[in-house]
Amino acid sequence: MTSSTEDGGGSNGPRLDLGDKPDLEPPQPAGCKGKIDFLFVISSGGFVEGMQEQLIDAFPKFIETIQAKFADFDYHILVTDGRADYWGSPYCTKACPMHPDPACVGYPCDLLDLAGPCETTWGAGNVFNVGQYTMNKPCDVAGGKRYVTREQPQLAETFECIARVGAAGADLLGYTLVKAISPEFEGPGGCNEGFLRDDALLVVTLLSDTYDAFSQGTVESWIAALREAKHGDEDAFAVLVLTTDIDVGYWQLCHPDEYSMVKNRLRLLVEGIEHGFIGSICEETYTPFFAATVAEVVELCDGLVIPQ
């Protein structure tokens, strides 16, 4: 052990070497204290209305089970879909104003007058879904945000409104995830401003009935975006995926007579992180899948280290 003498302080100068003890104690878990940010990225491409319906059915039980674990459950819930930078349904627009298809009932024909800048921004939280199989109305999210908070009355009904993203979009879930948590969206004036909190656990859920073959970037870049959003802490986020199981083997649920040896990139995403869960989109109900994740979500929340 040495002391500083170069500043004229002699042996009474500041001691610079603390011997074998570390200069700083490692950060201790503070826990998220019930703060969880839920991000749902839902496919709006293909025949997905049934999948969205099952998610809506499973959601209340999932939230209620987690809520029972915390004295103070403080959630943010943001839903976005894997579409590009457009809003609405060309099919329903073409049918205006009569809407012969029941799936287009209520579709607003005056879209250009209704759309705000975030309605047509890729990765922004959904608060006004329009098109086939949507509610075709604003979702009345409390506080004027693009995500739901615990101040939201009628949570289940509001989640249904934002989660019915329709079937006139795409399956670009990986890249949509990156956009939704990007600094440009989370910063002041961004569409999702305030959604991500440093002292909250992030739980991402992705739903698609097909491969994510066309998202920009690589699986590694998607994972890097998650790590960056949570300051490099792999234990500060979890990813839940419901997707096709055709890459698992024969006799799976979705296509029992088919098998793809090429893995879905959404499956590779789950395999590339510490806390990932994946299930079949073809299950009759998603409630058991979400129930199986609750224990780990609670454990991660309790062990969260708040960045300094």
Image (cartoon, grey):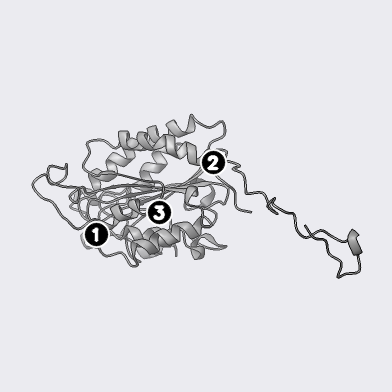
- Which residue is labeled 1 in the image? 96
In the image, which disc is placed on residue 303? Answer: 2
Q: Is residue 117 above or below residue 307?
A: below
Instruction: Determine which residue is flagged by label 3.
Output: 126
Contact check, label 1 and label 3, Cβ < 8 Å = no
Question: Residue 175 location, x and y as percent?
Answer: 36, 62
Query: Of helix, strand and loop, which one carries label 2?
Result: loop
Camera-side residue of 133 and 273: 273
Left or right of 94 in this view: 17: right
Look at label 3 and name its amino acid.
Asn
Quote the CA–CA distance across marks 2 and 3: 31 Å
Circle 1 Cα neighbour tier, 10 Å, few/some/many (<14 / 14–19 / ≥20): some
Q: Please state the horizontal and vertical placement of residue 283, each as a whole percent of the image.
A: 22, 39
Q: Earlier in the sequence, mark 2 or mark 3?
A: 3
Residue displayed at 12% across by 42% down: 251
Residue 203 location (% of width, % of height): 44, 46
> From the viewer's perspective, is the residue at label 1 or at label 3 nearer?
3
**Secondary-structure class at tag 1:** loop
Above or below for 52 versus 223: above
Q: Nearer the viewer, mark 2 or mark 3?
A: 2
Vertical placement of residue 178 versus 159, above or below:
below
Residue 126 % position (x, y):
40, 54
Three-letter amino acid code of the residue under disc 2: Gly
